[in-house]
Image (cartoon, rainbow, N blue to C red):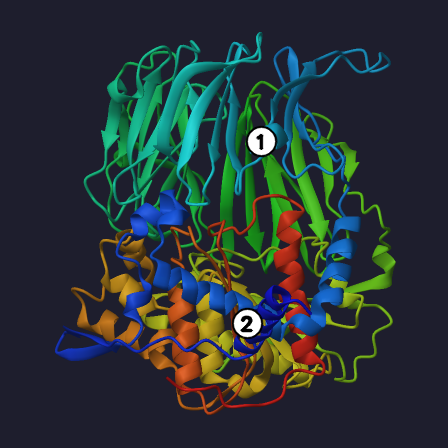
Amino acid sequence: MPADETSRAKRASAGQRAAARPPVAPIRTVETVVHGVTLRDDYAWLRAENWKDVLRDPDVLPEEIRRHLEAENAYCKAQMASTRALQRELVKEMRGRIKEDDSSVPQPDGPWLYYSRYRKGGEHPLICRRPRVSDLTRKKSREQIMLDADALADGKDFFDLGDTAHSPDHALLGWSADEAGSELYRIRVRDLATGEDLPDIVPDTTGDIVWANDAGSFFYVALDADHRPSQVKRHRLGTPAESDTVLHDEADAGMFVDIDQTQSGRFLLISIGDHETSEIRLVDLDAPETPPRLVAAREVGRQYEVEHHGEDLLILTNADGAEDFKIVTAPLGSPEPAHWRDLVPHKGGRLILDHLCLKGRLIRLEREDGLPRIVIRELGDGTERSIAFDEEAYGLGIDPGYEFETDTLRFLYASLARPAETYDYDLATAERTLLKRQEVPSGHDPAAYKVRRIFATARDGEQVPVSILHRADLPLNGSAPCLLYGYGSYGSAMSASFRTRPLSLVDRGFVYAIAHVRGGTEKGRRWYLDGKREKKRNTFTDFIAAGEALAEAGFTTRGRIVAEGGSAGGMLMGAVANIAPELFAGIVAEVPFVDVLNTILDETLPLTPPEWPEWGDPIRDIRAFETIRSYSPYDNVAAQSYPPILAMAGLTDPRVTYWEPAKWVARLRASMTGGGPILLHTNMDAGHGGSAGRFDSLKETALAYAFAIKAAGDGWPQSVPAKA
């Protein structure tokens, strides 16, 4: 062998040996004192001092940190080397369930039908329209591709198409894109007659676009230097972004700012709020230069959302003790709370999730006993009727579309075993028309699967719903492995709707389960309140109870459960790993929020101040400090055996910064007495959502599922990792 080839072979062999050993992060202890308590952080150095610059340009990441993350990726790859063929097989299976040339059901708006579709093999959507025709026997009208996101993404390491919004006169298309994964969206405007973009460029936005009705300007939310959505601005076409008019400048760093518009198209909604308080201001889209008008001043604990109908506002709110929300009306001319009158009174245990006004009607989406339904109310006479389904667990949603003066309501339905269906519901006749059933090109027979719902008894006696999917022919004798998914924060409910990706596990004999733990709203607003701040530990013990109940009922057994969760659900993963490691065969923690105490103590991070209502303010409240410190996964890593853990991160993630999982993994390895391995995979070209392409993202899912299969199967040799 020539000398140069011998040298390369030796270097490759050395690299393989290094990759077979877990990286050891140097300990450089930083001490801080909070409320008289000394906090020690051995791995604070993994947080780059220039992390804000890294969000914009990943290439500026300090070299030492880059080398460490790349070493972690190499170690993860080496530990998962035996699953490479399996990962390729999983990607092929999951891709086979995706209709490659899929398209959305067209939504009417005036003379046009708007929709998106994919070309075969395309990663990103085409944004399209065609003329609206009333004669259904005619051939399809000629399509206009307004935006080709595949072409826009060509040659870029990352591309995420944000909002697309056509102007009210149908002549322009506003669109936004993020090209780093850091959720800094740049807005452009396309002339639909020429297909060319106008010179207007608006950088550093959330990506959302709302047009004024004269199509001469649009509204957006600007991000400040700390990556917080703080200003609502109006951009007039043909003027520089630097001269845009500021309509609202939020001084409270703890408040999120968002925009939307009423279904009537009459008003821009400027929404200001955190996780328990809200405030809304209206701008007349027919007179976009008029100042915003306040509906109700912010009052701690009061939340509300606004819709518009005629001379009234219809307001969804928890005011006056309506824990599960009610709907009130208020005159458009005097919308203050003193004039609010109940229209749909509060009913405990029935959580009103959303509301929508179409001409003459109020539509609400609500959940009771863990199951959703749609209720239509005639505003003229107050009569109501509902849309619901009979399965044990299912998902239901409203697609509002663009029009207000319509007798058609579009909704979507799916269950864990039944592919998503899109219906048009005739509000005059109550007839349903199936427009589309999600296609699974590789084939799918709902009858081959069983959907179940059981209840786990929590430590305090509460009944925790658990949605379950398994093959109908699976023997329920405890022999099956289980993937148990959980989230449990911010009041987000986990829908029991159709997911094609978990079928790759279910078809291999897994039970797939969703634990509807406290911190969500599956059982009403109380379910959320019982899983936040000082009651946060309920989220963790509910999840453990769900795993134990699945084992007791014969769906699986202790030690064969792989837990999965992402973001705040990743915090759940870190907590249960500390509390009950013996219950799990493995844990998949995706962009896990695990360095909770340090993050919530740092008010310079983008999302920290708005998070205090959810977790508590540990800076000013010693009880909140003690509570968070008692469960923060990073701070509670113990000298014990841990199951295999796969942590997945995104370098440009502004929500859960890359260093949280990196620090957690380092501390786990340095502290644990056995078990593992502990793996970290960081996507060096993406942020919180991982790869943006619809096929590229399958690779990350395949890694997670291959990890789950290996963890619940032959696993890894038990060992104690090297210490620093």
Between 603 and 264, the residue placed more toward the observer is 603
Q: Earlier in the sequence, mark 1 or mark 2?
A: 2
Q: Residue at x 70, y 45 (%)?
A: 413
Image height of 402 relative to 286, above or below: below
> Looking at the picture, which amino acid does disc 1 mark?
Pro
Q: Quarter holding the C terminus? A: bottom left
Vertical comparison of 452 with 105: above or below: below
Front residue of this view, candidates 394 and 443: 443
Q: Nearer the viewer, mark 1 or mark 2?
A: 2
Q: Which mark is residue 15?
A: 2
Give percent across and percent down for residue 238: 36, 10
> Callout 1 environment at 10 Å: few (<14), some (14 to 19), or many (20+)?
some
Residue 234: percent from left, percent from top: 32, 21
Mark 1 and mark 2: span between their CA atoms?
A: 55 Å
Query: In the rendered view, does 212 fall on the left or right side of 435?
Result: left
Residue 341, compared with residue 519, is above or below; it is above
Q: Quadrant of residue 421?
A: top right
Give the labeled residue for mark 1.
400
Residue at point 53% right, 13% down? 196
Q: Amino acid at mark 2?
A: Gly
Question: Taking the image as drawn, is residue 616 in sight?
Answer: no
For label 1, the SS is loop
Residue 177 appears anywhere in the view:
yes
Q: Which secondary structure, mark 2?
A: helix
Q: Quadrant of the N terminus?
A: bottom right
Residues 716 and 589: in front is 716
